[in-house]
Amino acid sequence: MAKSAKATNTKSSASKGSNTKSSTSKTASSKSGSSKRSQGNSGGKSDATMLKELFLDELKDIYWAEKHLTKALPKMAKAATSEELSNAFTQHLKITQGQVERLEQVFEALDMTARAKKCEAMEGLVEEAQNLLEELPKGSAVRDAGLIIAGQKVEHYEIAAYGSLVQLAKTMGENEVANLLQQTLNEEKQADQLLTELAVSGINIGAENEPESAGRK
Ligand code: FE
Ligand code: ZN
Ligand code: FE
Ligand code: FE
């Protein structure tokens, strides 16, 4: 209770500070303008423009995420015990490289230069995968089970991102863009399904039969 009261005090004094700044600094005043705009319609920008800005921000986010995955997937392939799972990651690496190029086509179709903006979520998901690998013994089936979980979390994030982007593109009447993003969405769904099949087809059973001594630190 006392702690939260303290936090509130800190927050209100911090926001006082930023209010003071905003009357003197150009950057801060333009920032406060944009937050006003998102609350009401007083900023002068149309909803259509704001939607496009949101769309572009999300596009830059997933562009960063896909590029990040082109570095993570080879490590996941190398870490896998089962050859099938390793191949699945390698295959998805190639698909992911194609998805990076497809996103560049999307930027081009919108007359934009492709730009990446750090995706905190994908950075975190990849970090979690790395942590799992540190905990699970090399050459074990349980390591593969962990890799499948990590891989599916990644695919589900991508499915959510592309699903939303496809809908936004359709709303904006950007049909070419919607088609491109839909192709990637389909690939992500396939990748997710393949991982489910690999889990069901034996990796999880293998992990369950593994003795405890092969197990975790
Ligand atoms: Fe992808
Ligand atoms: Zn993100
Ligand atoms: Fe998330
Ligand atoms: Fe993917």
Image (cartoon, grey):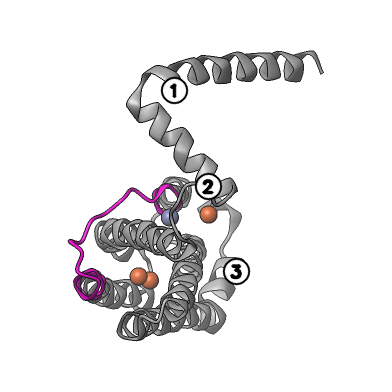
Residue type (three-letter) at the residue carrying disc 1: Ser
Q: Nearer the viewer, mark 3 or mark 2?
A: 2
Instruction: Name the residue that disc number 1 marks.
Output: 22
Within 10 Å of the Cα at label 3, are there few (<14), some (14-19), or many (20+) other Cα atoms? few
Judged by depth in the image, the label closer to the viewer, 2 or 1, is 2
**Which of these two is toward me, 52 or 106?**
52
Outermost residue toward the right in this view? 1
Q: In the image, what residue type sits under mark 2?
A: Ser
Looking at the picture, how far across and down is residue 35, in whole percent? 51, 41
Q: Position of residue 25 (x, y in %)?
A: 36, 21
| Residue to which mark 2 is pinned | 42
Q: Position of residue 126 (x, y in %)?
A: 40, 52
Tag 1 near tag 3, CB within 8 Å: no
Q: Which residue is mark 3?
A: 209
Let me know if residue 112 is in the magenta part: yes
Tell whether label 2 touches label 3 (CB within 8 Å): no
Q: Is residue 55 magenta?
A: no
Q: Residue at 58% of width from left, 60% of height from top? A: 211
Left or right: where 195 falls relative to 205: left
Tell me which label, 3 or 2, sits earlier in the chain: 2
Give the residues in magenta: 102-123
- How far apart in space, not on screen, are marks 3 and 2 (Cα)? 63 Å
The kind of residue tagged 3 is: Asn
